[in-house]
Structures are given as C-alpha cells and as structure tokens.
Amino acid sequence: TKNGICLGKDYPYTSGKAGLNGECQSTCKKQKLAIDKYSWAVGEDKLEKALNTQPVIASVEAGNYAWMFYKSGVVMACPGNDYDHSALVVGYGSEIGVNFFKLRNSWGLNWGDKGYIKLLRGVGDIGTCRVAEYPLYPKIVGTPAPTTKPAC
C-alpha cells in the first residue's frame, strides 16, 4: 500500500472479444488502504448482515445456463453442483415479492443486467448457486488518500 491503488471506475472492464485493450490512466484517485484480516459470512443471514456494511466476495456456481444466458429477473436455481467462479455480492432486496441477493460479475456491462445478476434469497443453507457457502470480506484499515499520478 505504499503508493495506493486506483479505483475500479478508473479502469473499467475491457472485453477480450471486442479486441480492445485498456490504457494506463495518467491520473486517478488512489486509495491507500490495507487488509488487516478477513471474515467469513457463511449462511444467508450472516451474508445479509455483512452486506449492511460492505460488499462481500462469494464463490458461486456459474458454469451453467442460468448464468451464461442471464439477462434479467431473479435466478431461482442453478443446474450444477460445485462452485467455479467468484463474484461480488453488493446487496439484497425484493422484486415483485421475490427476495434476492444482487451480485456484480466480472464479465462486463454487456453481460446480464448491465453486469449484475440477482439470485434467489431465502432458500437457507448455502443459498442459490452456493452464494452463501463461502462468502468472505476483508477488514480494511487505512484512510483514503488521493494522488494525481499513478505509476504506469
């Protein structure tokens, strides 16, 4: 954390399919932070509680049609049996009476619902697509400190 890290918005995802490469930015708002330790949020209740303070990374079961062809709505089940991907769980809510966890995926804005997917919440145990089996979040220490020039 000597020089900090640029925010995600400074380096948006660039699809390999489009053949576009990202460029090194000459300026960004760098954050000087460190991970002191991490905590598990296993189970839907603990995952919800953790989401009240910050996003949580989760291992999920994404190598299936439910994820590959997702566009909108709430995924009710995942056809598979093991986790094979990670995504950032950013919140939870309800849509037309159906409770869900909202995840930000790493496959770009053209995938899913502008880069997001909603998984059924309230099934208990490991959750839909195993979202609540191994959720993990860091304990961050430090203070954000902007700088003007990243090392490219």
Image (tube, helix red, strand yellow):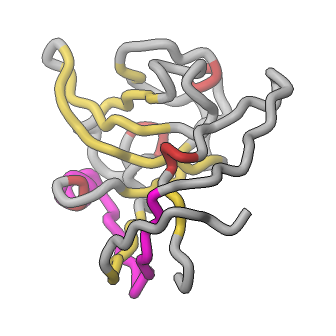
Q: Residue at x 71, y 50 (%)?
A: 24
Q: Please give left or right for residue 12 compared with residue 88 in the image.
A: right
Residue 14: name its quadrant: top right
Quadrant of image for the C terminus: bottom right
Magenta stretch containing residue 44, yes or no?
Answer: yes
Measured from the top left, where is residue 38 in percent x and y?
40, 78
**Residue 152, above or below 17:** below
| Of 46 and 109, the residue lying toward us | 109
Measured from the top left, where is residue 60 in percent x and y?
53, 46
Which residue occupies the extreme right position in the image? 19
Measured from the top left, where is residue 23 in percent x and y?
74, 43
**Residue 23, above or below 152:** above
Q: Residue at x 53, y 60 (%)?
A: 6
Magenta stretch containing residue 43, yes or no?
Answer: yes
What is the tally of numbered marks visible in this picture? 0
Q: Residue at x 38, y 31 (%)?
A: 119
Q: Residue at x 36, y 20 (%)?
A: 74
**Residue 61, above or below 67:** below
Q: Please give left or right for residue 58 compared with residue 23 in the image.
A: left
**Residue 65, above or below 92:** above
Q: What range is drawn magenta here?
A: 29-49
